[in-house]
Amino acid sequence: MIAYQAIIDELYSKINQEENLGQVAQYIPELARIDPNYFGVYFSAVEGESYGIGDWQRNFSIQSISKVLTLSIAYRLLGDTIWKRVGVEPSGSAFNSLIQLETDKGIPRNPMINGGAMVICDMLLRELKNPMEEILQFIRKMTLNNQIDYSDAVFQSEKLVGYRNIALCNFIKSYGNIENSPEEVLDFYFKMCSIEMNCQELTQVFSYLVNSNVTNAAGEQILSLSQAKRVNAIMQTCGFYDESGEFSFKVGLPGKSGVGGGIIAVHPNKYSIAVWSPKLNAKGNSYRGMKFLEQFTTKTELSIF
Ligand code: GLN
């Protein structure tokens, strides 16, 4: 038996006392106002053990973590056809980079970078009457919390200054890989990034990637085993943008970060763990989150490798 709780307690208090480096996301004014000292962790094992410490009950902006959820909904609805419009290669560049899109003719490298997530949003806008409601319902059913919603303040704030994302979406549209109007796609994209929940809820939502037999409220499997494996593979190789190799190297789990300071990591068939601390490193990933997870998989001697 691994003493998960003791390891979490020890690492939490150790890292909490060390210097908290980095900066909270500055380019979204509403996110820049957050208290940088929040630090929460929630761990949930398949075998039933679960444990939270610090600010695990406080809601935060999940930002790019939502990209895994829209990808999963699109994959479930459309199957492998989605890979015609978005790739599965790590980009090795920043989440909001435009560089590769020109050479790749508007096909984003993967669904974890902004451009790729926008193409997925575009697919969902075509497939679903109200995709935002659909993703919220999905989350509410997985967490049994009907209050979960997006923050209108964060949504408006990002939309107001979203020049780079607006450019990205229009650039992809110029290659014909966005069908709807960029305004519509961006509204959906910004809203999904503004969804808020706490660390515990994040582990509940991601349970279908820990165990693909997890069902939704209607008793249906969310993704097939093969699809769940692939989504995990994409998180493993692309979930941290140009720090994905580093995360694999140091943590060794599929995971996804967001500029709200959250990170979710899953160990298929074993556990999921969510860490939230708003200060980001230079690559836009939570400074303490990366540090905590690296030491967690070292101490537990468990990783997928
Ligand atoms: N909403 C953010 C953006 O598009 C999400 C980025 C992130 O979390 N990495 O810039």
Image (spheres, rainbow, N blue to C red):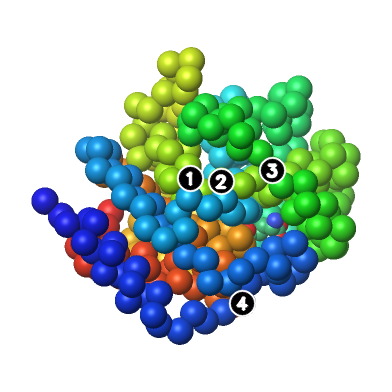
Q: Residue 150 carries which label?
A: 3
Answer yes or no: disc 1 within 8 Å of ligand 1: no
Q: Distance between the residues labelled 1 and 2?
A: 7 Å
For mark 2, does the 10 Å Cα neighbourhood hold few (<14), some (14 to 19), or many (20 or more) residues?
many
Q: Kindly indicate whether the residue at mark 3 contacts the one at mark 4 (C-beta within 8 angstroms).
A: no
For mark 3, does the 10 Å Cα neighbourhood hold few (<14), some (14 to 19), or many (20 or more) residues?
many
Answer yes or no: disc 2 within 8 Å of ligand 1: no
Vertical side of 265 occupied by 74: above or below: above
User: In percent of the image, x 47 and y 65: which residue is there?
Assistant: 39
Q: Position of residue 68 (x, y in %)?
A: 55, 44
Q: Nearer the viewer, residue 103 or 180?
A: 180
Vertical side of 175 occupied by 138: above or below: above
Q: How far apart are marks 4 and 2 (CA)?
A: 21 Å
Q: Residue 202 carries which label?
A: 1
Q: Can residue 219 be seen in this view?
A: yes
Q: Which amino acid does label 2 sit on?
A: Met
Q: How far apart are marks 1 and 4 (CA)?
A: 23 Å
For mark 4, does the 10 Å Cα neighbourhood hold few (<14), some (14 to 19), or many (20 or more) residues?
some
Q: Distance between the residues labelled 3 and 2?
A: 9 Å
Q: Which of 293 and 125 is in front in this view?
A: 293
Looking at the image, is mark 4 or mark 3 earlier in the sequence? 4
Q: Distance between the residues labelled 4 and 3?
A: 23 Å
Looking at the image, is mark 4 or mark 2 earlier in the sequence? 4
User: In percent of the image, x 40 and y 75: which residue is there?
Assistant: 16
Q: Residue 197 carries which label?
A: 2
Q: What residue type is labelled 3?
A: Tyr
Q: Nearer the viewer, residue 115 or 287?
A: 287
Q: Kindly indicate whether the residue at mark 2 contacts the one at mark 1 (C-beta within 8 angstroms).
A: yes
**Callout 4: SS:** loop
